[in-house]
Image (cartoon, rainbow, N blue to C red):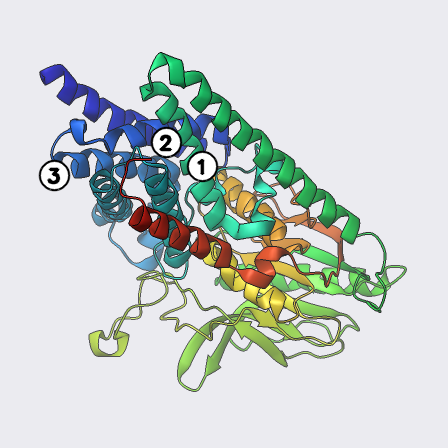
Amino acid sequence: MGNDRRIGWVAGAGGGLLAGVALPPVGWPWLLWPAVVLLWCLTESRGGPAGQRFRRGGLWGLAAVLVSHRWLLWLHPLDWIGVPGPLSLPICLALWLAIGLAGGLLVGAWTVLVGRLDPGRPSTALLAAALWGLAEVLLAKGPLFWLGLGAAALPGDRALAGLAALGGAGSLAALQLLIGWGLWRALRALPAQRTRWLLATLVLVVGCHLAGLALLAKADAGGRGVGPGDGEAHRAERWLVLQPAIPTREKFEADQQRRLLLQLASAQRQAASAEPPLQGVLLPEGSLALGQPLPLAAPVEVLSGGFRRKGVELRSSLLRFAPGELRAGGGIDKHRVVPLGEWVPLAGLWRWSGLSAVGGIEPGPASRLLARPGGDVGVAICYELSDGSALAAATRAGARWLLASANLDPYPLQLQGQFAALAQLRAIETGRWLVSSANTGPSLLVDAGGRVLETLPPGRPATGLVTVRQRTPLTPYDRWGEGPLIGLALMAGAWRWISRAPG
């Protein structure tokens, strides 16, 4: 009995650690599936009473989040925002642990629920997988979610990730759980039935890869030329991406602001003098200070991260400067703002503007669609990139390509790898080309099939010329969103209600 208890705890910790490693930047689902098998093992009633299953499942979630989100420790030191040195590391550790505990609570609750529904039944597997996928989509609407099992297929298995064009990241998360469930059923089955379960799981894996490849091939075919009646829907835009690589701790110092404006002026001249002239210049999140005009009235468009006021509220925004204009005439405000780092509830009552170097930021409207004469763009500012449904809604509303604007300093390359994987996933989901403009990287170009075509060296000042194609065809996910996943959950629930016998 004592050994059984220890095995349960080892399964929880080991499975969670393996899952955390398997997520991007590694992004290898074949490594994730054994971790998911261990998670299904923890749902069994023989794994102990509900409280014990909750703790072991929670340990799985805690370990997975702590490993995959360890980049949060790079916030230390926080002296640049006025936090005393002795408090900096404890605060960063507390934040990292709090997010891990939140993940542990959710996975622990899921483990208990599945255990009560009898995890061996196919209807339970379908329902539990669909609920997990929908939970990831819902969590991505809030401020405390970055990535989950839905991102696990990238960058290592683009063929499997192609299914995101059908059902989004939530469906990919559900698929990882179903594959793990099939392997778990094979392990616990009698020898005479084991081959049947392994074969069924293999058919699922191969079928999903073939379907994903077909969807990627369709995205590739749709990007060649102009379709009937599309007009200029597939025209190409050439942009100059400016990667300043200015440390966040120094970005608002006078010397660094002068350096940035010199870089921007040079980029504007380069874009205007190119043959043929470029569409414009892209700058990352938070590049321009509040009210900062452009250094030149060049005849090219500029899309730059910056700040603006709406009434008395300060917004972090992507600002649009029309050709020949020195001041922004439009833009889109960041909707998902970082708790404490950018936004504090009731900040006026607390008389505290948050930990941000620019003061308290208020969220803008939920729409991610930036209207512009050259073709509308779907915009994700920083970790808004984790919300695929919002960018799908922008695509449905007319976005012809996607722009991710970010400042990932002082975080390590691990976070940049996760950001790049999410950029690939968003491009596949929406069937749109995506440009990432980031302060220290990743600045890259991704096509509609999720391939990274261009990238700038991380952590160094650089400029890069990218050619992005506008597209108008909608993917199934653009059209239906989470409809198929909701349908799967309803079907599984009806199946359980109709059939009382074990599946």
* Disc number for residue 51: 3
Mark 1 lies on residue: 176
The alpha-carbon separation of the residues under discs 3 and 1 comes to 25 Å
As helix, strand or loop, the secondary structure at mark 3 comes to helix
Tell me the quadrant of the picture where the C terminus can be found. Answer: top left
Pointer 2 with pointer 1, Cβ within 8 A: yes
Mark 2 lies on residue: 36
For this view, does 405 lie left or right of residue 133? right
Q: Residue at x 9, y 17 (%)?
A: 2
For this view, does 51 lie left or right of residue 166? left
| In-front residue for pair 206/469 | 206
Residue 275 vertical placement versus 109 (above, below): below
Across and down, in percent, residue 454 comes to 71, 44
**Badge 3 or badge 1: first in the primary sequence:** 3
Pointer 3 with pointer 1, Cβ within 8 A: no
**Badge 2 or badge 1: first in the primary sequence:** 2
Q: Residue 460 is drawn in which quadrant?
A: top right
Residue 137 vertical placement versus 33 (above, below): below
Going by the numbered disc 2, the residue's amino acid type is Val
Q: Residue at x 57, y 32 (%)?
A: 156
